[in-house]
Image (cartoon, rainbow, N blue to C red):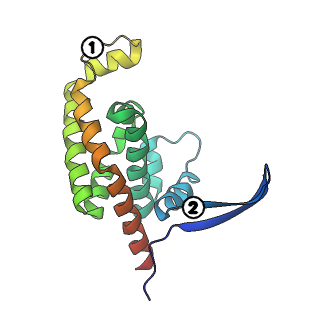
Amino acid sequence: GLRAPLPDLFLAVGSFQRTLVRIVVMSKHQTLMTRAYKKWANGMTYLDFLQALNVTERRAVTLGNLNYQVGNGGFLQWADNRYIQGLEHLREALTAVGTPAAVKVLAIVNQDAETYERNETKLRRWVDTDDAEDDTFECLDEFDSAFNEVSAQLLRDSDNFFRQKQAA
């Protein structure tokens, strides 16, 4: 039968002030990420970690990290925290999701990666010395804005994608 696209519900019992029961809503996407991160062993690089995951977990992790990092600190944060190392896996995940939002984000990610590589020396100097010229980040600003316009739809599409994979 058909199943409504509702997040999984987890019940946690505790004494949170006067609340005895707390309901935590987790999307399928977040559930996959949580499960995947339990596999990260000490000493693993990010790429080693991605390789240790199955394809569904790897897709969830790369899409989730893009959303968290860019949403929090822009593409510079995503690259500076070395998530750019999983770029090929991210491209594969966006292609697999395949919705208009995913296609748009794939184009944004590709343009951002090219721009980052062209400006990496200038960006690294800021990261390493905290000494930035006024225009240091302008090369990435347009990508942050474009991503933020479509990120909520990408999250919905990703969650639907992972729910459909589970149902198949």
Pointer 2 local density, CA inside 10 Å: few below 14, some 14–19, many at least 20 = some
Q: Locate the C terminus by quadrant.
A: bottom left
- Considering depth in this image, is 3 or 80 the residue closer to the camera? 3
Query: Quick check: 150 left or right of 32?
Result: left
The disc placed on residue 25 is 2
- Give amino acid for label 2: Val
- Does dot 1 land on a helix, a strand or a loop? loop
According to the picture, the residue beneath numbered tag 1 turns out to be 134
In the image, residue 115 sits, relative to residue 52, either above or below, namely above
Say if mark 1 contacts mark 2, CB within 8 Å. no
Query: Quick check: 91 left or right of 58?
Result: left
Q: Position of residue 121 (x, y in %)?
A: 26, 19
In the image, residue 105 sits, relative to residue 122, either above or below, namely below
Write the residue at 42% across / 53% down: 51
The CA distance from mark 1 to mark 2 is: 41 Å
Write the residue at 19% across / 39% down: 111
- Considering depth in this image, is 110 or 89 the residue closer to the camera? 110
Write the residue at 25% across / 30% down: 140
Query: Quick check: 18 left or right of 81?
Result: right
Residue 116 visible in rendering: no
